[in-house]
Image: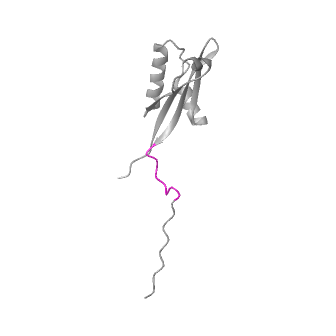
Amino acid sequence: MRKQSQTIYEVTILYIGSLNALRQREPFIVFFSNLKKAVETIIGQLALNGWPVKVNYTAVYRSLKQRGSYQCDFDVAGAKVFRIRIVPQTLNPVLTTMGIDEKPAEPTRKK
């Protein structure tokens, strides 16, 4: 039984700009198996925390198809605070030979 490859979506919150120098934070990364759920979760968290909802499903979908990634920056009074980045990742990719060639046959020894 062969496993099928599946696309999952890596959502990263990167803290950027001058405010990051004051309060160092590691990027936050989460994975979703469904793009619609990822976007809905982002929209919900932005609204819940008082940020403008500049993210929508259509923009994310188109950007992923055209550029292979999506990103949107958020700022306060012109100072960048964080960036949301969405990148598709392949789960269970088809395995290749990984560059390993077939073992050559060993010469037979004459007796």
- Write the residue at 49% across / 55% down: 96
Q: Where is residue 74 in the image (x, y as percent from the top left)?
A: 58, 19
| Number of numbered callouts drawn | 0
Magenta residue check for 88: no
Q: In this view, does 34 lie to the left or right of 15?
A: left
- Magenta segment boundaries in residue numbering: 91-99
* Magenta stretch holds residue 95: yes
Q: Where is residue 37 in the image (x, y as percent from the top left)?
A: 43, 27
Q: Which residue lies furthest to the right in this view?
A: 78
Farthest bottom residue in view:
111
Residue at the left extreme, as displayed: 1
Q: Which of 23 and 41 is in front in this view?
A: 23
Q: Which colour scheme is used?
A: one colour
Rendered residue at 53%/23% (across/down): 56
The residue sitting at 48% across, 13% down in the picture is: 49
In the image, taking residue 57 as reference, residue 75 lies left or right, namely: right
> In this view of the protein, which residue sits in the foreground, 50 or 22?
22
Answer above or below: position of 101 versus 53.
below
Main SS, magenta region, reads loop
Decide if residue 75 is on the left or right side of residue 27.
right
Q: Position of residue 18 (x, y in %)?
A: 62, 18
* Residue 106 percent coordinates (x, y): 47, 75
Vertical side of 86 occupied by 96: above or below = below
- Determine whether 91 is above or below 34 in the image: below
- The quadrant of the picture occupied by the C terminus is bottom left
